[in-house]
Amino acid sequence: MAKRNTGKKKVDYNPMKMEKEMAKIHRLINEQNFESKKDLENYLNNIMGDKINEFKTKSNPKYEAQDLVYEAYELPENKGKKLIERALKIDPNNADAYVYLAEIEEDNHKALEFYEKGVKAGKKSLGEEVFKEDAGHFWGIFETRPYMRARVGYAECLYLIGRCNEAIDQYKDMLKLNPNDNQGIRFHLSTWLIDQNRKNDYLKLYHKFNDEISAHWLFNHVLFLFKTIGKVKKTSIEMRKAIDQNPFVIPYLVGEKDIPETIPEYMGFGDENEAIYYWIDAAKIWYNDRKAMEWLFEVWERHLSMN
């Protein structure tokens, strides 16, 4: 999705590589009948590392299709697409196959169609009972992850083509399925809620994750406070916290530093990569508020003069 959001080149890496290994372990465990936790621990110790490739899982069309998708992510696009076609012939309800097709699609409307197919396929593959019995525990259940990936992409495309409230509703519903938010959708959602001036929804989300200390969370909250209560002491205090957490954010927002052509693969708390990722997601909502930007320049000049 990053290439559609920013126009910047994304680094070439495989987001599914770790999950590929996890999937095999998960399948192997599901095929066993352990009598105790000790038996499980011994089994895991035995299959870890290179030994995992020596263990074979039972033949299963869903597994075969999913493995083709994992492999597709490791290949050039023209070869990857052929594997995706094979995967969908084996399992038409493989949500990740549609996610792959959406991610390589440049047109947002066409990507949206693929993501929507992925959401429908994932829901059909999981079955209705999963949504009734396991709501609140999604992502922790390995089989739900392709569906959840498809929904993330679907929501992001909705937002990009201007169907903002529909996108927000998608994310709000996903947080009911996975309240722990392992996918980090709260960050985009907070930006979208500020952008759409949905104050009450923003505050509910902010308080739900009130222990969050990322630059994304802190700087978004500063902007929200500025928009709602202005340049008061509370806003300045929160700005100080945000700058202390990541001093790289404002230089990017005020144009002192340029966003690199290649998006960094990883980020850490308080580092420059975190600032770049924040700019990618939230620069627009700052730039759309002239008074907020004027204040941001004032804050940064004062910060520089004091340091």
Image (tube, rainbow, N blue to C red):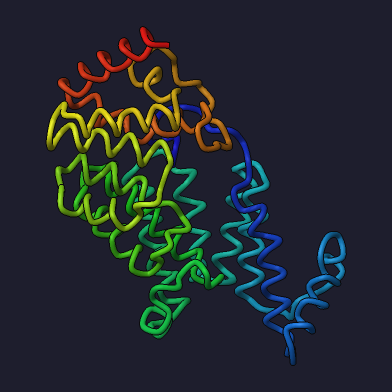
Q: Nearer the viewer, residue 143 or 279?
A: 279
> Residue 100 in the image: x percent, y percent?
52, 52
Q: Nearer the viewer, residue 54 or 91?
A: 54
> Residue 21 in the image: x percent, y percent?
71, 61
Q: Nearer the viewer, residue 219 or 18?
A: 219
Residue at horizontal 44 percent and vertical 23 percent from the top? 247
Residue at horizontal 46 percent and vertical 77 percent from the top? 126
Name the image quarter holding the C terminus.
top left
Name the image quarter holding the N terminus.
top left
In the image, 103: left or right of 77?
left
Q: Quadrant of residue 205?
A: bottom left
Residue at horizontal 79 percent and vertical 84 percent from the top? 39
Residue at horizontal 22 percent and vertical 34 percent from the top? 234
Name the outermost residue toward the left.
229
Q: Quadrant of residue 171?
A: bottom left
In the image, 44: left or right of 147?
right
> Residue 173 in the image: x percent, y percent?
30, 65
Q: Count the labels in the image.
A: 0
